[in-house]
Amino acid sequence: DANDTEKGLYPHYMLKEIDEQPAVMRTLIQEYVTPTGESTIPVEIVSEMAESDRIYVVGCGTSWHAGLVGKKMLEELTQIPVEVHLASEMGYDMPILSKKPFFIFLTQSGETADSRQVLVKINEMKLPSLTITNVKGSTLSREATHTLLLHAGPEIAVASTKAYTSQISVMLFLAKALGEKLGQEKAKGLDIVHELGIVAAAMESLVDDKDHYSELSQSFLNETRNAFYIGRGLDYAVSLEGALKLKEISYIQAEGFAAGELKHGTIALIEKGTPVVALISNKEMGSHTRGNIKEVESRGAKSLVIALEGLEKETDAIVLPHVHELVTPLVTVIPLQLLAYYASLQRDLDVDKPRNLAKSVTVE
Ligand code: G6P
């Protein structure tokens, strides 16, 4: 039960929260779509957004990473341009705003000081905003014009997992409702209940395969000081999140990269045995990523390829069940969460409470 704050039989909250993700997907379908298939997102939110000429998504850490995925979904289904900003930068370095901006604050806790300081400025300018948060009544929820909830249940582990996938899903519901309102064919054609149902089943099959990830982590990440995550498009966004998960709880120095960018500098760090995790969930971009995998392998890297069913090669370590191309981050991230979990466990570290980190950072 995602609303349970006890670990139960789980050794760590993080593992429990990873496992809860399929259930959270199903809860979100119930919360955001009526039994007759109508969106439950308040019309005030959709109407206000429909009038905006640009959407600004603001967040920190994992929430910022979810924003990078949300940008693609919103742009694809609504055709409104979207910018994603780090709250700690935007607070002091406000970009030139469009004529009719709309702000989305992504924050699991609803209490992050860096995000709040941007909201305070937005409110001074009397601009409309929406907070997408897991905590009802939280500061950013109270201070924004609108709120949508993540319905993920309490997230206790410092490393965020189910909040990330629920943030992405809520943005998908929002993008669909907004796109429909704007008459966008792609939005009308997307059967979100069907696609997220497939995602939930795919997530389930992945989290049921824990021994595989434990073994992969042991053989691939044991001993290493560093690791790289590469991908293009949505896979790039998820690479950043995968690298962050590994850093946070295993203390392995990890970097997420746009696959084609590695050769413009960072490939100098590849040595014999350097682990490179590569994501392939898009046919066209994936074929280019295959080329980048060859480049690093020929410099000695050992690669771990995670590919969507239909795009796999025999040597790939992980084949993910096929899902709609817009929702691949909801499944590509699961192996990365599990690899990070086992890397931390195998190093005997405190999985749920890593050093130097706090669940919610309420100071600047
Ligand atoms: C902290 C946490 C991160 C989280 C970030 C943003 O740094 O350790 O896991 O992603 O804050 O938190 P928020 O509650 O605003 O999503």
Image (cartoon, rainbow, N blue to C red):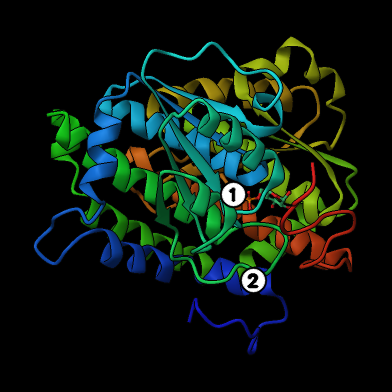
Question: Badges 2 and 1: C-beta atoms under 8 Å apart?
Answer: no
Counting from the top left corner in percent of width and height, residue 173 is at 30, 48
Query: Which residue shows up at 74% across the image and 22% down it?
Result: 298
* Residue 161 in which image quadrant: bottom right
19 or 112, nearer to the observer: 112
Give whichever of discs 2 and 1 has the lower sequence position. Answer: 2
Identify the amino acid type marked 1: Ala
Residue furthest bottom in the image: 8
The numbered dot on residue 317 is: 1
Q: Of helix, strand and loop, which one carries label 1?
A: loop
Identify the amino acid type marked 2: Leu
Q: Of helix, strand and loop, which one carries label 2?
A: helix
274 or 259, nearer to the observer: 259
Counting from the top left corner in percent of width and height, residue 75 is at 34, 26
In this rendering, is residue 326 above or below 35? above
**Location of the C terminus (image quadrant):** top right
* Residue 58 in which image quadrant: top right
Q: Is residue 309 visible?
A: no
Give the labeled residue for mark 2. 15
Q: Can residue 259 be seen in this view?
A: yes
In this rendering, is residue 213 above or below 262? below
Counting from the top left corner in percent of width and height, residue 348 is at 89, 69
